[in-house]
Structures are given as C-alpha cells and as structure tokens.
C-alpha cells in the first residue's frame, strides 16, 4: 500500500487508508456480486430446463396413460356409426351415451371443444345414414337442421349428449327406411356426376364425396346392388359418353380423351379397346360406315 504518511499527517493518512480499503472492499463485493448473479442465472436456466423436461415427461406419461382410453373412445365412435349405418336405433342411441362418457374421460369437457366434436359427429352420422340407405336429400336436410339447433342452443355438454343420442336414433331410422328404395338413387346420382364431369379424371374418392358417402361404403353399395365395382361403373359410364362424342365429327380422338379427363390419349385408347374390343378410331369408322357419315381424318 502506498506510504501516504510521507505526504500527509497521521490522521489524514488514516482517512486515506480507510478510503482505499473501502475501495478495495467495494470492488471485491462487486466482483463477488457479479459472480453470484452469473451463478444464479445459470441455476435459473438449469431449473427452467429441468421444469421443461419434467413437463414433457409428464405429458408423455399422460399420453400413454390415456392411450387405452383414447382407443376405447374411437371404438365407441365406430360403434355409433356402425349402428346408424345398420339402422339400429336403440344401439345407436346407447353407443352415443357410451361415446360421450368416453369424451369426458378424454377431458373434452370444455364446452367449445365439446360442441365442435358434436358437430363433427353429426356430419359423420349423416354420412353413415346415407351409406346405410337414407335419402341423401333427407339426410342433408336433417343434418343442416341439427347443426343450426346446436349452433344456436344454450345446452350444457350433458344436455348435448342426450340430444345427440336422439339425433343418432333419427339417422338410424332414416337409414332403415330408405334402404329398400334409395340405393339405386345413389347409383343414378353417381352416373349423373360421372357423365357431367368434363376435363378431369373421375376417381372413386371424388364420386363418393359427390354423393356424401365414404369410398368403402359406396363400394359395398355397388357390389350389393349392381354387382360391379365403382371403378368399373365409372369406366362404363365414361366409355358410353366417349361413344357419343366420337359420333360427332367435330371431336378428334384426342379431344374426346381430354374431355373425359385423360391427360394422355393413349391411356384412353387402351381403356376403350379393353372394354369395347376396338380402338376409338376403329369405332368411329365403323359407326361412320353404318350411318354413311363423312368423318374427317384423324
């Protein structure tokens, strides 16, 4: 330490030495405080990380703990739709009661989430009813009415569950009543949809959406009612449409192919020959010969 007493008196020297000591003490305290703050910050970061890990672990444990409940819930939902599709009114109503008991176990008690799920279930039951034989128009009308009621109502989740049970019974009744007369109406609508489609390839999925059915339900209906697959029916309707277009000299074979949604005319020609036994060009020439029509060169 500097010999202050050579410049100042003893008393003054003591004051300077005290101030110098205080300066060193404050510096040391500041350094220690900085180290403490940094250490505290590291501890906080570690604690935050541990909390995040714990929360992630708890969420994962919760998922695995509820997985059995979730799978049971899905099974009850499928049972509800099967019962509606089969026209079993009481079974459909009971399945809904069990289903909403499962919804409570999955913490769907939040009213907004509960209502959203109820709306989705109504739409799914409507589709199941149509697949079971209900009139599409009647099922759609009922679905719209139910959606309006649910959107405007002040029912509690428990009351919604009871109401949905009655909705399920009604959809099941519609499926049972319409089973004897509606299937061929579905076939007719499919034919109309395929015939009216222009410039796009018709698929089973698109057709099913157009008649408010699932692809599997539509396939079962076709097998049961007319003994062929939906794809075979689509091809048959499209080839019939192609024959009419080929009879018009304004359309080339490529035009016809594109009109039916084939990007590659050769694929259309292959399908036509497989189903009719001759190429579109040969078909056109044959029909022209029968009608003595003047057909332009391809």
Image (cartoon, rainbow, N blue to C red):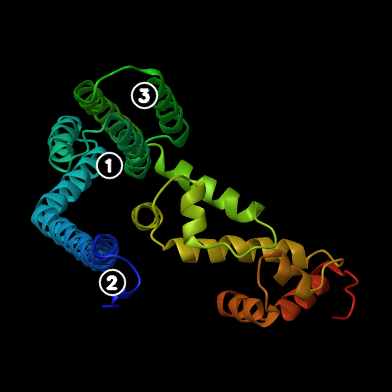
Of circles 3 and 1, which is in front?
Answer: 3
Name the element at disc 1: helix
Residue reaching furthest to the top: 154
Identify the disc placed on residue 150: 3
| Quadrant in which residue 20 is drawn | bottom left
Look at 74% across and 68% down and name the residue there: 256
Marks 3 and 2 in Cβ contact (< 8 Å): no
Q: Where 145 falls versus 285 (above or below)?
A: above
Of circles 2 and 1, which is in front?
Answer: 2
Choose between 85 and 6: the one closer to the eye: 6
Of circles 3 and 2, which is in front?
Answer: 2
Q: Where 133 falls versus 15 (above or below)?
A: above
Look at 28% across and 77% down and name the residue there: 3
In the rendered image, the quadrant that contains the N terminus is bottom left
Q: Position of residue 48 (x, y in %)?
A: 22, 60
Q: Earlier in the sequence, mark 3 or mark 1?
A: 1
Q: CA distance from mark 3 to mark 1?
A: 22 Å
Q: Position of residue 98 (x, y in %)?
A: 12, 36
**How many numbered dots are placed on residues in this image?**
3
- Residue at which label 2 appears: 5
Q: CA distance from mark 2 to mark 1?
A: 107 Å
| Quadrant in which residue 244 is drawn | bottom right
Q: Earlier in the sequence, mark 3 or mark 2?
A: 2
Choose between 150 and 94: the one closer to the eye: 150
Name the element at disc 2: helix
Q: Position of residue 167 (x, y in %)?
A: 28, 27
- Residue at which label 1 appears: 85
Q: Give the crowd class for mark 3: few <14, some 14-19, many >=20 residues within 10 Å.
A: some
Name the element at disc 3: helix
């Amino acid at each position: 330490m500097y010999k202050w007493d050579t410049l100042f008196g003893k008393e003054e020297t003591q004051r300077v030495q005290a101030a110098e000591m205080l300066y060193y003490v404050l510096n040391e305290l500041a350094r220690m405080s900085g180290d403490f703050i940094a250490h505290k910050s590291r501890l906080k970061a570690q604690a935050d990380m541990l909390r995040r890990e714990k929360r992630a672990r708890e969420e994962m444990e919760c998922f695995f703990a509820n997985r059995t409940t979730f799978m049971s819930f899905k099974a009850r939902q499928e049972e509800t739709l099967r019962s509606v599709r089969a026209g079993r009114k009481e079974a459909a109503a009971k399945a809904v009661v069990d289903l909403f008991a499962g919804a409570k176990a999955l913490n769907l008690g939040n009213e907004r989430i509960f209502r959203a799920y109820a709306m989705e279930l109504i739409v799914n039951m409507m589709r199941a009813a149509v697949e079971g034989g209900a009139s599409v128009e009647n099922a759609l009308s009922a679905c719209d009415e139910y959606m309006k009621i649910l959107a405007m109502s002040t029912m509690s989740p428990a009351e919604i569950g009871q109401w949905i049970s009655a909705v399920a019974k009604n959809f099941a009744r519609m499926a049972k009543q319409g089973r004897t007369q509606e299937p061929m109406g579905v076939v007719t609508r499919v034919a109309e949809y395929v015939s009216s489609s222009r410039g796009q390839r018709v698929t089973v999925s698109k057709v099913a959406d157009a008649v408010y059915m699932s692809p599997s339900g539509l396939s079962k209906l076709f097998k049961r009612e007319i003994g062929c697959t939906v794809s075979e029916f689509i091809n048959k309707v499209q080839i019939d449409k192609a024959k009419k277009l080929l009879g018009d000299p304004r359309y080339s074979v490529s035009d016809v192919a594109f009109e039916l949604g084939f990007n590659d005319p050769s694929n259309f020609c292959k399908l036509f020959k497989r189903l009719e036994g001759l190429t579109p060009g040969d078909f056109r020439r044959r029909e022209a010969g029968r009608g003595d029509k003047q057909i332009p060169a391809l």
